[in-house]
Amino acid sequence: NAGVMQNPRHLVRRRGQEARLRCSPMKGHSHVYWYRQLPEEGLKFMVYLQKENIIDESGMPKERFSAEFPKEGPSILRIQQVVRGDSAAYFCASSPPPGTGSYNEQFFGPGTRLTVL
Amino acid sequence: AQSVTQPDIHITVSEGASLELRCNYSYGATPYLFWYVQSPGQGLQLLLKYFSGDTLVQGIKGFEAEFKRSQSSFNLRKPSVHWSDAAEYFCAVARGSTLGRLYFGRGTQLTVWP
């Protein structure tokens, strides 16, 4: 069973461009979480999604950031008009549905390192 | 509001020495507690977790952690450190039985001297 997949692993964007980060959860997992890690800091929660539904977006910046987890395909974290302060590592995690084994454990992907020039 | 404090930003130990990484949390009810390890350029790997029951939890790679409610702590320990344990360690807290967001500490960077 493959783990959580994220791509690209590294992404370079110029200020004002758009960044799209993709996350494919583990097989059978229906919950996806996005976290951001700034240099010298821990991970900060951004958003929690189920398929076609945003459960908790309390950690998402109000502007320029959006996330989706469609019925088919990976979850996407989209950052519009990137600024230098968006440079960070973005991690995706997934968990299985409640009632299944390890439903209360999050499995993390390798991250996407975004650099904004 | 929930918060997690890892008071030690950087710890250096000699190979073979014992290790204790500190974690304190702030949360009104019984939390779900986790320790993750992150190697450079990698994602996070779960070392161990505590939900209920025995307050001494065994994890992978020889790690253990003890939940102390009176001290709001969940310290990570290993009796004998190996050079391959050098990494960054994160303590995290989740609320109750419905897993949602994790609250992370800022991490402790472990350096192991040969």
Image (cartoon, coloured by chain):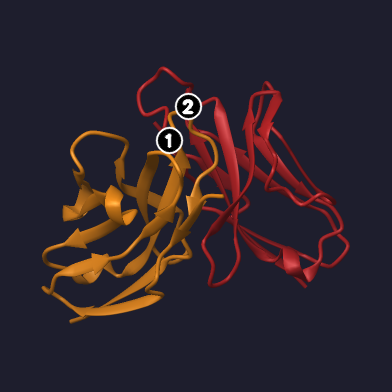
Chain colours: A red, B orange
Between discs 2 and 1, the one toward the N terminus: 1
| Disc 2 chain ID | A
Structural crowding at the residue carrying mark 1, measured as other residues with C-alpha within 10 Å and reported as few (<14), some (14–19) or many (≥20): few
Q: Position of residue A19 (x, y in %)?
A: 77, 53
Q: Position of residue A32 (x, y in %)?
A: 57, 35
Which residue lies under the disc numbered 2? A27
Using the rendered image, report if marks 2 and 1 lie on a common chain. Answer: yes
Q: Secondary structure at mark 2?
A: loop
Q: Quadrant of residue A22?
A: top right
- Callout 2–callout 1 Cβ contact below 8 Å: yes
- Relative side of A92 to B54, left or right: right
Q: Which mark is residue A40?
A: none
What amino acid is at disc 2?
Answer: Lys
Per the image, label 1 sits on a secondary structure element best described as loop
Amino acid residing under circle 1: Ala
Q: Which residue is mark 1?
A: A2
Q: At 36% across and 47% down in the image, what residue appears?
A: B34
Q: Nearer the viewer, residue A45 or A4?
A: A45
- Label tally: 2
Look at 18% across and 82% down and name the residue there: B114
Query: What percent of the width, then of the height, locates residue B105?
Result: 46, 60
Q: Is residue A64 above or below residue A100?
A: below
Q: Is residue B17 above or below residue A10?
A: below
At horizontal 43% and vertical 51% (from top left) the residue drawn is: B92
For the residue pair B37 and B94, the one nearer the viewer reads as B94
Q: Nearer the viewer, residue A11 or A31?
A: A31
Horizontal side of B10 relative to B102 (left or right) equals: left
